[in-house]
Amino acid sequence: MDFSSEFLKDLSDRGFLYQCTDFEALDKLCCSGEKLTFYVGFDPTAKSLHVGHLLWIKLVEKLQSFGHNPIIICGGATSRIGDPTWKDKQRVMMNDEMIAENTASILEKLRQLIEFENCKLLNNYTWLSELNYLEFLRDFGPLFSVNRMLAMDSVSTRLERQQHLSFLEFNYMLLQAYDFLYLFENYGCRMQIGGADQWANMISGVDLIRRKTEKQAIALSIPLLTTSDGGKMGKTTGGTVWLHQDLTSPFNFWQYWRNVDDRDVGKLLKLFTVLSPDEADEIADLAGSDKINEWKIF
């Protein structure tokens, strides 16, 4: 769509925008000058975030630069369940010690990448651990349609492949939706951002807020970071490209970006640098060796 907000125009030109529950409402909000509180969540399912998460972090940075206020959620509770989204198998269950170690490692890296001066850092275990299961079922169970949950692409695809989906995993969508409601009511959080593979969970939160409060919240998804041949960016023959130097050395991290396909250079420059989209396109049009030596992500 055509945006009135210069900020959203820039995000669109750079390729940050994929899906939104209401682009028109978001555009009006951005044009109004109102400062928006939004959140993004990271489940500590590994010791480190990977390069795909950099896109989320970069969007947080851009929203902050326009005065919007982020909430970073560490999924200390939801990581105990595991998100079934697009997975063929249930995640390996982690104990409290593993979750604590992963959380500490991820937060250390996030503090290097995100400006925390106007940012709240919360752990959803704080409020989810206090839920009474019977009360939760009574108060929120009627607001979720199993028919609709089964129709979500992330769930239906798994069922079509005849892969096991446990009742435990099925609860993940409910808990993430409750996270959004909790942040909406207690912190004035009006928008969630996340990857395209989180869309079903995100719109469930928007719907829950509407049903419980009769107010509007917004979900905004970011496209998955893929290569020009359709592969998932950050996957190499050696495995995942992590943000933690103990898992991916600084040299291998640098080498990964230097070796990306020439066809991806323009897209990556728009997403990860302060170059204008036009400047990114100019570099992308350069010949091979000139292009490699001209562009830098960091």
Image (cartoon, rainbow, N blue to C red):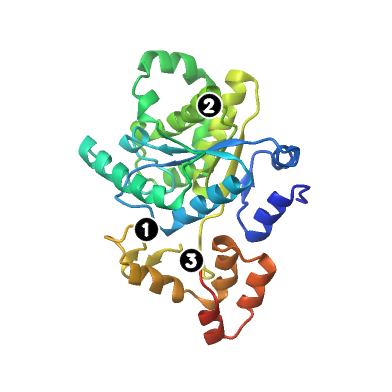
Cα distance in 3D space between marks 2 and 1: 29 Å
Amino acid type of the residue tagged 2 in the rendering: Tyr
Q: Is 236 on the left or on the right of 144, as rendered?
A: left
Cα distance in 3D space between marks 1 and 3: 13 Å
Q: Name the residue carrying label 2.
A: 187
- Which one is earlier in the sequence, the residue at label 1 or at label 3? 1
Q: What x and y, as percent, mark residue 177?
A: 49, 30
In what element is the residue under mark 1?
loop
In what element is the residue under mark 3?
loop
- Which one is earlier in the sequence, the residue at label 2 or at label 1? 2
Q: Quadrant of residue 239?
A: bottom left
Cα distance in 3D space between marks 3 and 2: 33 Å
Q: Name the residue carrying label 3.
A: 298
Q: Nearer the viewer, mark 1 or mark 3?
A: 3
- Residue most extreme to the front: 117
Residue at x 51% of width, y 66% of height:
230
Q: What x and y, as percent, mark residue 287?
A: 59, 86
- Which one is earlier in the sequence, the residue at label 3 or at label 2? 2
Nearer-the-camera pick, 46 or 168: 46
Q: What x and y, as percent, mark residue 207?
A: 59, 29
Residue at x 62% of width, y 66% of height:
275
- Answer above or below: position of 92 versus 256: above
Nearer-the-camera pick, 198 or 66: 66
- Answer above or below: position of 129 versus 162: above
Q: What x and y, as percent, mark residue 152?
A: 52, 40
Amino acid type of the residue tagged 1 in the rendering: Leu
- Answer above or below: position of 132 versus 203: above
Nearer-the-camera pick, 213 or 230: 213
Q: Name the residue carrying label 1.
A: 243
Amino acid type of the residue tagged 3 in the rendering: Phe
**What is the crowding at mark 1: few (fewer than 14 residues within 10 Å), some, or many (at least 20)?**
many
Q: How many marks?
A: 3
